[in-house]
Amino acid sequence: MPKTETFNRSQVLQQATEVFHKKGYNGTSMQDLVDATKLNRSSIYNSFGSKLNMFLEVLSHYQSIHNHNFSQGIAKSYNASKAIETIFDLHLQEIVNDQDHKGCMVINCKSEMTNQEPSINSFMEKNQDKMIVMLEDIVSNGQMEKIFNQKQTANQYALYLFSSIQGFRMTGILNKNKEELKNLINIILKVLY
Amino acid sequence: MPKTETFNRSQVLQQATEVFHKKGYNGTSMQDLVDATKLNRSSIYNSFGSKLNMFLEVLSHYQSIHNHNFSQGIAKSYNASKAIETIFDLHLQEIVNDQDHKGCMVINCKSEMTNQEPSINSFMEKNQDKMIVMLEDIVSNGQMEKIFNQKQTANQYALYLFSSIQGFRMTGILNKNKEELKNLINIILKVLY
DNA sequence: ATTAAAATGAAATGATCGTTTCAAAATTAC
DNA sequence: GTAATTTTGAAACGATCATTTCATTTTAAT
């Protein structure tokens, strides 16, 4: 009986992502979202509830795409060493392709909203947990295979890598020199061997 | 003949800093600044010109305080090793004391505004240059004293440290465990030896 | 075709945005 | 005290904010 949602929700989320990514949450107005999605105001509110709710959905969407890319890249890797390199290479590609210096949307959001919005704080804690688990798993494998050293626990190295990735993305906002960034990755990963 | 500025400019900047730091640039309204500084709207515009101009002054003020702390800490250090440790320890203290998870204002601003506001982009490029020069100088000394290795140039290590500091501050937004963070610093610095 | 339910369009909501205006008050030099 | 100059206070500016309202259109099942 009901008329069904006509627009492509995933495509709308993608369009909203681009705006939020470029302007940040507080810098994005509902008018920006109307313009970007070509949806009517009321349709947005019908489908997403509020600006914050839409943003949370955008964040999850963005994250799930990245997790998918990660998983795919890691699955193709022969060993733990390649897996870690793959993760950094994916970030490197994003940095080099990001010609308008937006940085990583999740990291931008962490710095903008974690201390202001409980739902974002919770998202970021879960995000960190997931990342640490994933990294710890890879490091742990690498240590069992004697590829990585055991001077630190896999969990400690995982936090180090998580921290390094954030720094790498922040650095990549201004520095797009591929060779310099590749060398930076080399230095970051040296401690594991 | 003129009536002179009655308020303490440095104190007003400090009050404005707290608001901008907590809420970010786009999240801070002129009303917030009026409330925080107890200044009149027109006084703010007379003295600072615009919200963006006030923010730029706040940023410089914040940076000069930190540079001063750095310089003082580094001057007290016996050698390059201690100098680097001092820098990270200062950041560690800020993280632990930052109970409302604001993070570093400069890094927050970098992620919020670098791609949107040319004056901020320029500020951030200068900031990076200064930091790299300072770090490169310390590393270079450490290499001459044979405290640090020479597998990479001082400039490459400086970029690595700059990147690591940013990651450290981003990590510190959610993670306040002092022992865990101290261990993280140890891992970060290991590559230098 | 009729009916139910949702999507849509356009306008309006009150609040807040950054900024300006201007007369009144305050201060300094003469 | 007078004149010069700036800081203030309070109100107002038009624009934009996120959100709501509601009548109209569109769709899907009966």
Image (cartoon, coloured by chain):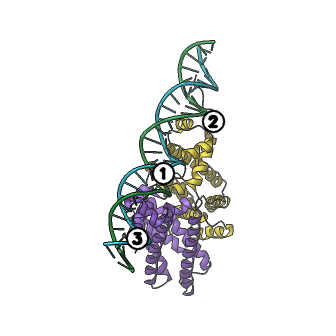
Chain colours: A purple, B yellow, C cyan, D green
Question: Which residue is at 50% across, 82% downward?
Answer: A80
Q: Is residue B155 visible?
A: no
Determine the chain carrying the residue at label 3: A
Label 2: few (<14), some (14–19) or many (≥20) C-alpha neighbours in 10 Å: few
Element at label 3: helix
Q: Nearer the viewer, mark 3 or mark 1?
A: 3
Question: Which residue is at 48% across, 84% downward?
Answer: A79
Q: Is residue B28 visible?
A: yes
- How many numbered marks does the figure carry? 3
Q: Nearer the viewer, mark 3 or mark 2?
A: 3
Residue B121 % position (x, y): 45, 52
Q: Please tell me which residue lies in front, D29 or A3.
A: D29
- What label sits on residue A98 in the rendered view? none
Q: Quadrant of the C terminus of chain A?
A: bottom right
Q: Amino acid at mark 1?
A: Lys
Residue A23 lies in quadrant: bottom left
According to the image, label 1 marks what residue?
Answer: B126
Label 3: few (<14), some (14–19) or many (≥20) C-alpha neighbours in 10 Å: few
Element at label 2: loop
According to the image, label 2 marks what residue?
Answer: B7
Determine the CA span between mark 2 and mark 1. Answer: 30 Å
Q: Quadrant of the N terminus of chain A?
A: bottom left
Question: Which residue is at 53% across, 39% downward?
Answer: B48
Element at label 1: helix
In the image, is residue C29 above or below residue A155? Answer: above
Determine the chain carrying the residue at label 2: B
Q: Please tell me which residue lies in front, B136 or A93.
A: A93
Q: Amino acid at mark 3?
A: Arg
Q: Amino acid at mark 2?
A: Phe
Q: Judge from the rendering whether residue A154 lies leftward or rightward of residue B153; answer left or right.
A: right
- What label sits on residue A9 in the rendered view? 3
